[in-house]
Image: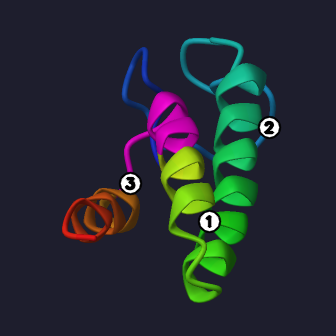
Amino acid sequence: MTRCPNCKARYKGGEHCHRCGMELNWLLNIEKSAQVLRSTLVKSLADADYQQTRKLVRQHQQLISHSLIDNIALFLNSK
């Protein structure tokens, strides 16, 4: 996260926005989960396990938007 989704202040670390005080833990947890999914997804793609990769792409897209995952989804649509 680079900015607070509420007030757009730069994220300086911590559990709350330094400007507006919004709790950011749940967003940080989502980002961490997406990061773990991305790693698993890339490994399954490297193993050519396209069925598992598709499943992980859908899970990732439910959490957060990411250009790499969007491109992998496009690739998988051609398979």
Of tags 1 and 2, the one toward the viewer is 1
The residue segment tinted magenta is: 58-66
- Helix, strand or loop under label 2: loop
Assess disc 1: are there few (<14), some (14-19) or many (≥20) residues with their C-alpha within 10 Å of its C-alpha: many
User: Which amino acid does the dot numbered 2 rest on?
Assistant: Gly
Q: Considering only order in the chain, which callout, 2 or 1, is on the residue closer to the N terminus?
A: 2
Q: Which residue is drawn at 55% across and 58% down?
A: 51
Closer-to-camera residue (5/7): 5
Q: Position of residue 62 (x, y in %)?
A: 49, 29
Q: Position of residue 13 (x, y in %)?
A: 73, 46
Q: Residue at x 38, y 43 (%)?
A: 65
User: Which amino acid does the dot numbered 3 rest on?
Assistant: His
Q: Rounded to the nearest whole Å, what is the CA distance between mark 1 and mark 3?
A: 13 Å
Q: For this view, does 2 lie left or right of residue 35? A: left
Q: Are marks 2 and 3 in contact (CB under 8 Å)?
A: no
Q: Do the residues labelled 1 and 3 touch (CB within 8 Å)?
A: no
Residue at which label 3 appears: 66
- Helix, strand or loop under label 3: loop
Q: Quadrant of residue 9?
A: top left
Q: Rounded to the nearest whole Å, what is the CA distance between mark 1 and mark 2?
A: 28 Å
Residue at which label 2 appears: 14
Assess disc 3: are there few (<14), some (14-19) or many (≥20) residues with their C-alpha within 10 Å of its C-alpha: few
Of tags 2 and 3, the one toward the viewer is 3
- Helix, strand or loop under label 1: helix
Q: Residue at x 59, y 88 (%)?
A: 46
Residue at which label 1 appears: 41
Closer-to-camera residue (10/57): 57
Residue 59 in sight: yes
Assess disc 2: are there few (<14), some (14-19) or many (≥20) residues with their C-alpha within 10 Å of its C-alpha: few
Q: Would residue 64 be counted in the magenta stretch?
A: yes
Q: Rounded to the nearest whole Å, what is the CA distance between mark 2 and mark 3?
A: 23 Å
Q: For this view, does 3 lie left or right of residue 32? A: left
